[in-house]
Image (cartoon, rainbow, N blue to C red):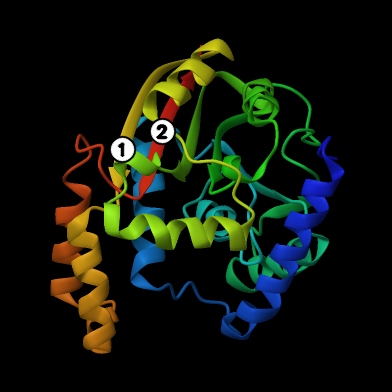
């Protein structure tokens, strides 16, 4: 388990409460029907994997997979050889397993309850790992990054998403994100320099950053609040604004920081 048990217990309580709130939206049919934001985020992840030549024989682990396990499910739907997800919440693992078997019944993912700083797999098993919105929750993030390096094969890819440095978030949104941090149990935000230091020290090379959640994203969100129909998967305007947000990866001002690194 996480070495700081008070923190992991706190996080498990937060996650389980959130699952109870969100589980009503769990699809009942075996289909991958996603909101636009989720589809966009999966497109980015699997687009990067394709660029990095993680082929269909690849093995993927999602660290902190949540109750729906979207990344493992999508990996299996894309034909990857193996996809797994881990969570500290047993409830999340159970729901993810149900959803995975509904969505890809012939080749469903596997889920395990364990913590991110003590992953229950032997070394050098996976071609890629994803770690979305997790590092900011753990007391010792070096332990988690070290575990990623341990379980990845040589030249394996880590795809990590964290909240950006407060100084890089628009000033008028900082108060809101401080509230989110308290509610969700976030312990920190990250700068590019901090992540470069940690990842380099723990065995990663070829570190690349992408920033999203620029001002255009705020505009997109406000439009969808005013005009809910813009959330439709076929909405050209929503996807146009999304492309504008994602076309600015070198602009380090934004809400979310994504890093892609290769194990040396």
- Residue 109, x across and y down, in percent: 66, 55
Residue 29 appears anywhere in the view: no
Q: Going by the image, does 45 lie left or right of 93?
A: left
Local secondary structure at mark 2: strand
Q: Position of residue 169 (x, y in %)?
A: 32, 48
Rendered position, 136 above or below 90? above
Q: Position of residue 118 (x, y in %)?
A: 79, 33
146 relative position to 161: left or right: right
Figure label count: 2
Looking at this view, is 62 or 105 the one in front?
62
Assess disc 1: are there few (<14), some (14-19) or many (≥20) residues with their C-alpha within 10 Å of its C-alpha.
some
Q: Are marks 2 and 1 in contact (CB under 8 Å)?
A: yes
The residue at 43%/72% (across/down) is: 34
Q: CA distance from mark 2 to mark 1?
A: 6 Å
User: In the displayed structure, does residue 157 sit left or right of residue 202?
Assistant: left
Which residue corresponds to mark 1? 210
Q: Nearer the viewer, residue 165 or 195?
A: 165
Residue 259, numbered circle: 2
- Identify the residue at horizontal 42%, vertical 63% (top origin): 176
Taking the spot 16% from the left edge, 46% from the top edge, the residue there is 247
Tell me what residue is drawn at x 85 percent, y 40 percent.
1
181 over 25 or under it: above or below:
above
């Amino acid at each position: 388990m996480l070495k700081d048990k008070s923190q992991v217990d706190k996080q498990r309580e937060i996650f389980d409460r959130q699952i109870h709130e969100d589980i009503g939206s769990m699809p009942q049919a075996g289909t991958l029907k996603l909101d636009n934001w989720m589809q966009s985020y999966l497109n980015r992840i699997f687009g990067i994997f394709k660029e990095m030549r993680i082929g269909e024989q690849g093995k993927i682990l999602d660290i902190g997979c949540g109750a729906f396990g979207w990344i493992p499910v999508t990996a299996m739907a894309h034909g990857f050889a193996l996809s797994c997800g881990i969570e500290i919440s047993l409830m999340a693992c159970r729901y993810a397993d149900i959803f995975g078997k509904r969505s890809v019944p012939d080749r469903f993912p596997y889920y395990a309850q364990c913590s991110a700083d003590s992953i229950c797999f032997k070394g050098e098993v996976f071609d890629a790992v994803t770690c979305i919105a997790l590092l900011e929750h753990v007391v010792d993030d070096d332990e988690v990054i070290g575990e990623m390096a341990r379980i990845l094969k040589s030249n394996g890819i880590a795809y990590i998403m964290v909240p950006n440095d407060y100084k890089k978030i628009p000033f008028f949104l900082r108060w809101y994100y401080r509230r989110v941090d308290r509610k969700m149990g976030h312990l920190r935000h990250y700068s590019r320099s901090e992540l470069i230091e940690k990842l380099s020290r723990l065995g990663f090379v070829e570190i690349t950053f992408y920033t999203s959640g620029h001002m255009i994203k705020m505009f997109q969100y406000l439009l969808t609040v005013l005009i809910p129909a813009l959330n439709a998967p076929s909405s050209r305007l929503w996807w146009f604004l999304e492309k504008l947000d994602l076309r600015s990866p070198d602009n380090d001002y934004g809400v979310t920081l994504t890093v892609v690194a290769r194990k040396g």
